[in-house]
Image (cartoon, rainbow, N blue to C red):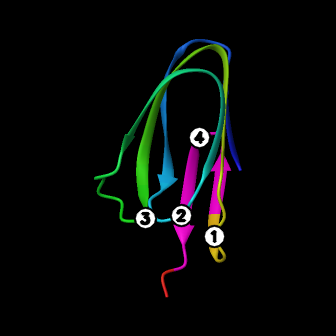
């Protein structure tokens, strides 16, 4: 699961899987836009605008893969067999 929170209003984006079901739980998100035709084969770009105090949680599963979130970056990897 990836969780986004913000104390100030703004805009952000997150990569979501193209070929897997995923769920979004959001509060204070005022609009979303899904860009499917990205250069990334496995992921689409979900852009969103939000109010102060907003939160967005995304969850999905891969049988084999990696999802690492650090303070200054994020790493996604799926096993390509």
Query: Residue 5 lies in what quarter of the image?
Result: top right
In terms of sequence position, does the residue under pointer 3 or pointer 1 come before the other? 3
**Mark 4 and mark 1: span between their CA atoms?**
24 Å
**Mark 2 and mark 1: span between their CA atoms?**
8 Å
Tell me which segment is drawn in magenta: 67-79
**Mark 4 and mark 2: span between their CA atoms?**
26 Å
Q: Nearer the viewer, mark 4 or mark 1?
A: 1
- SS of the residue at dot 1? loop
Q: In this view, does 19 lie above or below 6?
A: below
Q: Where is residue 63 in the image (x, y as percent from the top left)?
A: 66, 76
In terms of sequence position, does the residue under pointer 4 or pointer 1 come before the other? 1
- Which residue is denoted by mark 2 in the rendering? 20
Q: Do the residues labelled 2 and 1 touch (CB within 8 Å)?
A: yes
Q: Is residue 23 above or below residue 48?
A: below
Q: What number is the disc on residue 72? A: 4
10 Å crowding of disc 3: few (<14), some (14-19), many (20+): some
- SS of the residue at dot 4? loop
In terms of sequence position, does the residue under pointer 3 or pointer 2 come before the other? 2
Q: Residue at x 66, y 64 (%)?
A: 61
- Which residue is denoted by mark 3 in the rendering? 42
- SS of the residue at dot 3? loop
In terms of sequence position, does the residue under pointer 4 or pointer 2 come before the other? 2
Q: Does the magenta stretch include residue 7?
A: no
10 Å crowding of disc 1: few (<14), some (14-19), many (20+): few
Q: In this view, does 22 lie to the left or right of 3?
A: left
């Amino acid at each position: 699961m990836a969780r986004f929170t913000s104390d100030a209003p703004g805009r952000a984006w997150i990569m979501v899987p193209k070929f897997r079901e995923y769920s979004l739980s959001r509060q204070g998100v005022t609009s979303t836009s899904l860009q499917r035709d990205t250069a990334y084969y496995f992921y689409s770009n979900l852009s969103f605008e939000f109010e102060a105090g907003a939160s967005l949680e995304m969850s999905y599963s891969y049988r084999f893969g990696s999802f690492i979130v650090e303070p200054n970056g994020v790493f996604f990897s799926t096993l390509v067999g």
